[in-house]
Amino acid sequence: MVLFIEFLLRKFCSIRKISCEDYKAPNGHTVNASRKSFANYIQSAIYNDILKEKWIESIVENINHCTAFLVFITPHIIDSEFVNKEINYALSKKKPFYSVYLKDTKLPDKLHFQIAGIQSMKKYTMTDGEFYDKIKVVLSSVLVEKN
Protein backbone atom coordinates (compact mmCIF):
# COMPACT_ATOMS: atom_id res chain seq x y z
CA MET A 1 0.00 0.00 0.00
CA VAL A 2 2.83 2.40 0.89
CA LEU A 3 4.45 1.87 -2.50
CA PHE A 4 1.16 2.61 -4.25
CA ILE A 5 0.70 5.84 -2.28
CA GLU A 6 4.29 6.79 -3.03
CA PHE A 7 3.61 6.09 -6.72
CA LEU A 8 0.50 8.32 -6.62
CA LEU A 9 2.48 11.00 -4.83
CA ARG A 10 5.25 10.98 -7.44
CA LYS A 11 2.69 10.93 -10.28
CA PHE A 12 0.89 13.87 -8.66
CA CYS A 13 4.17 15.80 -8.39
CA SER A 14 5.03 15.03 -11.97
CA ILE A 15 1.63 16.20 -13.28
CA ARG A 16 1.66 19.33 -11.13
CA LYS A 17 5.36 19.96 -11.83
CA ILE A 18 5.99 20.21 -8.09
CA SER A 19 9.43 19.77 -6.61
CA CYS A 20 9.66 16.99 -4.05
CA GLU A 21 12.15 18.92 -1.93
CA ASP A 22 11.63 19.15 1.80
CA TYR A 23 10.87 22.43 3.53
CA LYS A 24 10.68 23.61 7.11
CA ALA A 25 7.13 23.97 8.45
CA PRO A 26 6.30 26.85 10.86
CA ASN A 27 6.27 24.39 13.77
CA GLY A 28 9.87 23.41 12.98
CA HIS A 29 9.14 19.99 11.49
CA THR A 30 10.54 19.09 8.11
CA VAL A 31 7.73 18.43 5.66
CA ASN A 32 8.02 17.01 2.18
CA ALA A 33 6.48 19.71 -0.03
CA SER A 34 4.97 17.20 -2.40
CA ARG A 35 3.35 15.29 0.45
CA LYS A 36 1.80 18.51 1.78
CA SER A 37 0.50 19.42 -1.69
CA PHE A 38 -0.75 15.88 -2.18
CA ALA A 39 -2.51 15.96 1.20
CA ASN A 40 -4.12 19.29 0.29
CA TYR A 41 -5.14 17.81 -3.05
CA ILE A 42 -6.74 14.78 -1.37
CA GLN A 43 -8.43 16.98 1.25
CA SER A 44 -9.80 19.23 -1.49
CA ALA A 45 -11.03 16.25 -3.49
CA ILE A 46 -12.80 14.82 -0.45
CA TYR A 47 -14.40 18.18 0.32
CA ASN A 48 -15.43 19.00 -3.25
CA ASP A 49 -16.50 15.54 -4.34
CA ILE A 50 -18.00 14.06 -1.19
CA LEU A 51 -18.81 16.53 1.57
CA LYS A 52 -19.96 19.34 -0.71
CA GLU A 53 -22.44 16.99 -2.36
CA LYS A 54 -23.97 16.01 1.00
CA TRP A 55 -24.01 19.66 2.07
CA ILE A 56 -25.91 20.61 -1.10
CA GLU A 57 -28.40 17.77 -0.52
CA SER A 58 -28.94 19.03 3.04
CA ILE A 59 -29.52 22.62 1.90
CA VAL A 60 -32.02 21.54 -0.75
CA GLU A 61 -33.88 19.26 1.65
CA ASN A 62 -34.09 21.95 4.33
CA ILE A 63 -35.33 24.61 1.91
CA ASN A 64 -37.91 22.17 0.55
CA HIS A 65 -39.25 21.55 4.05
CA CYS A 66 -38.98 25.04 5.53
CA THR A 67 -42.07 27.11 6.27
CA ALA A 68 -40.34 30.40 5.45
CA PHE A 69 -36.93 31.42 4.13
CA LEU A 70 -35.02 33.95 6.19
CA VAL A 71 -31.73 35.29 4.86
CA PHE A 72 -29.36 37.49 6.82
CA ILE A 73 -27.70 40.06 4.57
CA THR A 74 -24.14 41.25 5.22
CA PRO A 75 -21.37 42.35 2.88
CA HIS A 76 -19.91 38.83 3.19
CA ILE A 77 -22.78 37.13 1.34
CA ILE A 78 -22.29 39.16 -1.83
CA ASP A 79 -19.60 36.84 -3.17
CA SER A 80 -21.09 33.65 -1.75
CA GLU A 81 -22.10 31.33 -4.56
CA PHE A 82 -24.10 29.20 -2.14
CA VAL A 83 -26.11 32.04 -0.58
CA ASN A 84 -27.13 33.20 -4.05
CA LYS A 85 -28.12 29.65 -4.99
CA GLU A 86 -30.09 29.25 -1.76
CA ILE A 87 -31.96 32.51 -2.43
CA ASN A 88 -32.72 31.49 -6.02
CA TYR A 89 -33.88 28.06 -4.96
CA ALA A 90 -36.13 29.39 -2.17
CA LEU A 91 -37.68 31.89 -4.57
CA SER A 92 -38.23 29.21 -7.20
CA LYS A 93 -40.06 27.13 -4.58
CA LYS A 94 -42.24 30.16 -3.75
CA LYS A 95 -41.25 30.06 -0.09
CA PRO A 96 -42.31 33.03 2.04
CA PHE A 97 -39.10 35.06 1.92
CA TYR A 98 -37.72 37.63 4.36
CA SER A 99 -34.37 39.35 4.39
CA VAL A 100 -32.73 40.84 7.45
CA TYR A 101 -29.93 43.30 6.82
CA LEU A 102 -27.46 42.94 9.68
CA LYS A 103 -25.20 45.61 8.16
CA ASP A 104 -25.70 48.28 5.54
CA THR A 105 -24.99 46.31 2.37
CA LYS A 106 -25.04 47.30 -1.29
CA LEU A 107 -26.22 44.27 -3.17
CA PRO A 108 -25.07 43.47 -6.70
CA ASP A 109 -27.72 44.52 -9.22
CA LYS A 110 -28.76 40.94 -10.04
CA LEU A 111 -29.29 39.99 -6.40
CA HIS A 112 -30.98 43.30 -5.65
CA PHE A 113 -33.37 42.70 -8.57
CA GLN A 114 -34.18 39.17 -7.35
CA ILE A 115 -35.20 40.25 -3.86
CA ALA A 116 -36.61 43.69 -4.67
CA GLY A 117 -40.09 44.08 -3.28
CA ILE A 118 -39.62 41.29 -0.75
CA GLN A 119 -40.18 42.22 2.87
CA SER A 120 -36.95 43.14 4.57
CA MET A 121 -35.75 44.60 7.84
CA LYS A 122 -32.68 46.68 8.55
CA LYS A 123 -31.68 45.30 11.92
CA TYR A 124 -28.68 47.61 12.08
CA THR A 125 -31.09 50.57 12.44
CA MET A 126 -33.08 48.98 15.29
CA THR A 127 -32.49 48.12 18.90
CA ASP A 128 -32.49 44.40 19.67
CA GLY A 129 -35.89 44.77 21.33
CA GLU A 130 -37.40 46.48 18.28
CA PHE A 131 -35.97 43.83 15.99
CA TYR A 132 -37.20 40.88 18.06
CA ASP A 133 -40.68 42.39 18.35
CA LYS A 134 -40.88 42.92 14.58
CA ILE A 135 -39.44 39.54 13.58
CA LYS A 136 -41.87 37.75 15.93
CA VAL A 137 -44.83 39.48 14.28
CA VAL A 138 -43.59 38.78 10.74
CA LEU A 139 -42.71 35.13 11.32
CA SER A 140 -45.70 34.33 13.51
CA SER A 141 -48.04 35.35 10.70
CA VAL A 142 -46.32 32.93 8.32
CA LEU A 143 -46.17 30.12 10.85
CA VAL A 144 -49.86 30.52 11.76
CA GLU A 145 -50.86 30.44 8.06
CA LYS A 146 -49.02 27.13 7.57
CA ASN A 147 -50.47 25.38 10.63
Image (cartoon, rainbow, N blue to C red):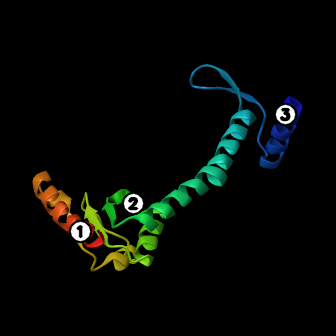
Residue shown at 11%/53% (left/top)? 129
User: Cα distance, mark 3 to mark 2?
Assistant: 41 Å
Judging depth in this view, the residue of 20 and 139 nearest the camera is 139
Which residue is under mark 1?
A: 144
Secondary structure beneath label 2 = helix
Graded by Cα atoms within 10 Å as few (under 14), some (14 to 19) or many (20 or more), the crowding at tag 2 reads: some
Q: Earlier in the sequence, mark 3 or mark 2?
A: 3
- Does 146 sit left or right of 18 as displayed? left
User: Cα distance, mark 2 to mark 1?
Assistant: 30 Å
Secondary structure beneath label 3 = helix
Q: Are marks 2 and 1 in contact (CB under 8 Å)?
A: no
> From the viewer's perspective, is the residue at label 2 or at label 1 nearer?
1
Q: Position of residue 135 (x, y in %)?
A: 19, 62
- Does 109 sit left or right of 34 as displayed? left
Residue shown at 10%/58% (left/top)? 130
Judging depth in this view, the residue of 10 and 92 nearest the camera is 92
Q: Earlier in the sequence, mark 2 or mark 1?
A: 2
Which residue is under mark 2?
A: 77
Q: Position of residue 104 (x, y in %)?
A: 24, 62
Position of the N terminus by quadrant = top right
User: Cα distance, mark 1 to mark 3?
Assistant: 61 Å
Q: Amino acid at mark 3?
A: Glu
State the image quarter where residue 112 is shown: bottom left
State the image quarter where residue 65 is shown: bottom left
Q: Earlier in the sequence, mark 1 or mark 3?
A: 3
State the image quarter where residue 106 is shown: bottom left
Q: Position of residue 35 (x, y in %)?
A: 73, 34
Residue shown at 40%/63% (left/top)? 78
Position of the C terminus by quadrant = bottom left
Graded by Cα atoms within 10 Å as few (under 14), some (14 to 19) or many (20 or more), the crowding at tag 3 reads: few
Judging depth in this view, the residue of 25 and 60 nearest the camera is 60
Which residue is under mark 3?
A: 6
